[in-house]
Image (spheres, rainbow, N blue to C red):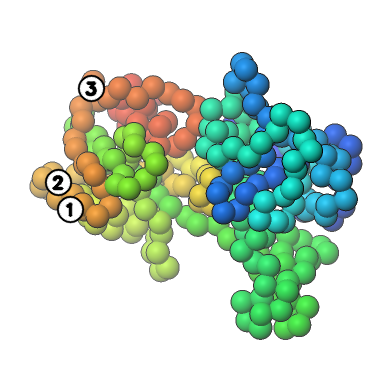
Amino acid sequence: MIQDIGEGKLDITYERRKPRAGDRLLLYSYKDKEIFLKKFEDGRVSVPEYPACGEVECVFLFRISGIGYYTVLSEKAGMGAEADFAYEKLAVLRRSASKELRFAGATGWQLYKWYMDNRFCGRCGAKMGFSERERAVVCPECKYTVYPKIMPAVIIGVTKGDDILMTRYRGREYKGHALVAGFCEIGETPEDTVRREVMEEAGIRVKNIRYYKSQPWGFEQDLLLGFYCEVDGDSTIKMDKDELSEAVWINRNEIEEKFEDMSLTNEMIVRFKENGYGGE
């Protein structure tokens, strides 16, 4: 999956230092959810290396394989002088052959968006400053401290024998098959979220909820928790037409998805297709 770049390659330890030659710049367009990169004819993509942005103040994000990654906190950093580079939709990274770059781009977006959303204090309105010792922004007036927020969400493989419940979202750019999914609410366990989301989206009760695997998903600032479960009683689907355009039972022999080595949803679908939950 997107986070599988190799054990020990990601170092998220916070640092307060300026970038050095050879460090990478992850530059984003906040409004349009775009990233500044160069595309090659063979499908490869790359991001600028420091000091491409000149004297602009850069903010440290993390290290991957010893290379520092930085961003610039602006709505859209001015990089017109960089030949062959342009702003592209962040989703372009999903097709990148470089696992490290696609993971860096998504995770960098998550941190960039958090910084941009917390430029001013939510208590007194003063401009926030950076913590010197940890990844946090601190109000110089009232000392309110804000840490990065991660939104837990569940991906749910609801099964009925050799059938799995497949959905399509309504009104979203992605039109392919998905699984029932949703965010954890305050006071809920992830298992409670599984029960609630399946009932809300499909009108079905479930049992035998089993945790499968997790995934950080920086594109949407999520921490995804994958679960499989089974229908408990009536399997008649009562689809939420506001949330979904389709919700159907599909036999594992009829699933057309192939393994993409990218998302938890895709892996769970293909795993069920190949051997059902519990198989090796």
Q: Quadrant of the C terminus?
A: top left
- Residue name at image x 72 percent, y 67 percent: 137
| Residue 62 visible in this rendered orientation of the protein | no
Pick whichever of labels 1 and 3 is earlier in the sequence: 1
Local secondary structure at mark 1: loop
Q: Amino acid at mark 1?
A: Gly
Distance between the alpha carbons at the discs numbered 1 and 2: 6 Å
User: What residue does disc 2 label?
Assistant: 237
Closer to the camera in the image, 229 or 44: 44
User: What residue does disc 3 label?
Assistant: 254
- Residue name at image x 75 percent, y 43 percent: 79
Local secondary structure at mark 3: helix
Q: Is residue 122 left or right of residue 70?
A: left
Q: Residue furthest front?
A: 80
- How many tags in the picture? 3
- The answer to the question of whether label 1 and label 2 lie on touching residues, with beta carbons closer than 8 A, is yes
Q: Amino acid at mark 3?
A: Glu
Q: Amino acid at mark 2?
A: Ile
Picture coordinates of residue 267, whole percent (x, y): 42, 31
Distance between the alpha carbons at the discs numbered 1 and 3: 23 Å
